[in-house]
Image (cartoon, rainbow, N blue to C red):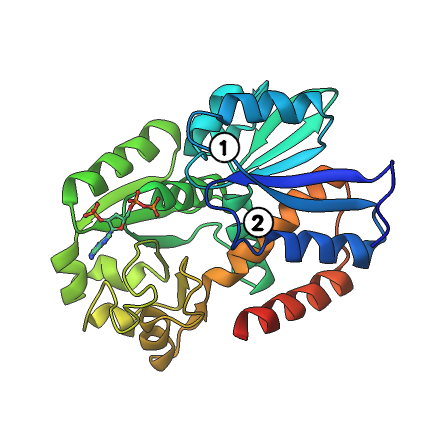
Amino acid sequence: MNISGKTKLLGLIGNPVEHSFSPFIHNMFAQELGIDSVYTTFKVENGELGNAIKGAKALNIQGMNVTVPYKMDVLAYMDEVDSLAEHIGAMNTIVRRDNKFIGYNTDALGLKGSLEHEGVNLKGESVLIIGAGGAARAVAVMCADAGAKLIAITNRTMEKAEALASYIDERYEVETVALDLELVRAGEGSLMESLKIAFQTTSVGMSPNIDADPLEDSHYYDYVKVAVDLIYNPTTTKFMEKASAKGAKAISGLGMLYFQAVKAYELWNDVVIPETVLNKCYKAFFEKMAR
Ligand code: ATR
């Protein structure tokens, strides 16, 4: 790495940030693409977000990622917000353009990219979203935006599933339905059979509780064709394992993590990362995570 006075500075703000994989990914992209950029992390203490954003702008920083706990609060400091990020109500990427800071949600764009990489298209599909928190909202907006036909939402707390279904209803043409988690666990009803793609957005099954899955012994595992987990630790969750055992394609949250970085790096540098580089870095990232 050759850092000079011309090197483009990129980084991550959040708290904590020291265990982030983003520096590894973005500095690998820079090296593989021959782009003169460097990416590092900035720990921002509670109450300092506004100062951090103003400082980044004044210091001519060209792009930033934003992570926990600032993904929602940072929206207020943007000059403009991309419509997808606005509908989700959260963002993770700042792009500097004409001295303006523009907010994007590449978590959602990355999930879409990960599905495309696996040959999964959401257009006209009926999907099931398990969970109704912030991550579920991002998934629901992404599915609606990508032209899904029907979005079913199930959650431990039914009221939150209903609230998310209404939220999507108010903004998109897509059909929505909130489903009782016990019904989904039973896996009964013709609707269940039509929900071919499922997104697991809860923390159930995350390390160290790796034997848990939100659907337990549901018959729904007989119907699902593509099972997407947003969890990336472990890389294969119980939810993915059970779906795979019944012949479904299982997709780890690691893909989303990788492709959110791809989308951010492409926006910051106004490039499209070529397939060969994309695949080479994907492999290197997955190998690093497997260690
Ligand atoms: P995130 O931003 O990651 O989505 P969140 O907004 O706190 O986090 O949402 C967490 C989601 O995981 C919710 O859908 C939550 O269900 P409730 O709305 O009923 O709280 C779900 N969740 C968390 N722990 C769970 C558990 N042990 N069993 C079932 N669902 C759980």
Q: Judge whether residue 285 can be spotted in this image.
A: yes
Note whether 1 is above or below 164 in the view shown. Answer: below
Residue 262, x across and y down, in percent: 65, 51
Residue 50, x across and y down, in percent: 51, 21
Q: Identify residue for label 1.
A: 85
Give the quadrant of residue 158.
top left
Left or right: residue 33 compared with residue 282: right
Q: What element carries label 1?
A: helix
Q: Identify residue for label 2.
A: 260
Question: Which of the marked residues, 1 or 2, is nearer the chain's N terminus?
Answer: 1
The quarter of the image holding the N terminus is bottom right
Asked whether 114 or 58 is in front, the reply is 58
Residue at the bottom extreme?
245
Kind of residue indicated by mark 2: Gln
Asked whether 174 or 80 is in front, the reply is 80
Q: What element carries label 2?
A: helix
Kind of residue indicated by mark 1: Ala
- Identify the residue at horizontal 34%, vertical 53% (top origin): 201
- Identify the residue at horizontal 41%, vertical 69% (top origin): 234
- Identify the residue at horizontal 33%, vertical 47% (top origin): 151
Asked whether 45 or 237 is in front, the reply is 45
Q: How crowded is mark 2: few (under 14 residues within 10 Å), some or many (20 or more)?
A: many
The quarter of the image holding the C terminus is bottom right
Q: Judge whether residue 115 can be spotted in this image.
A: no
**Number of numbered discs present?**
2
Residue 286, x across and y down, in percent: 58, 69
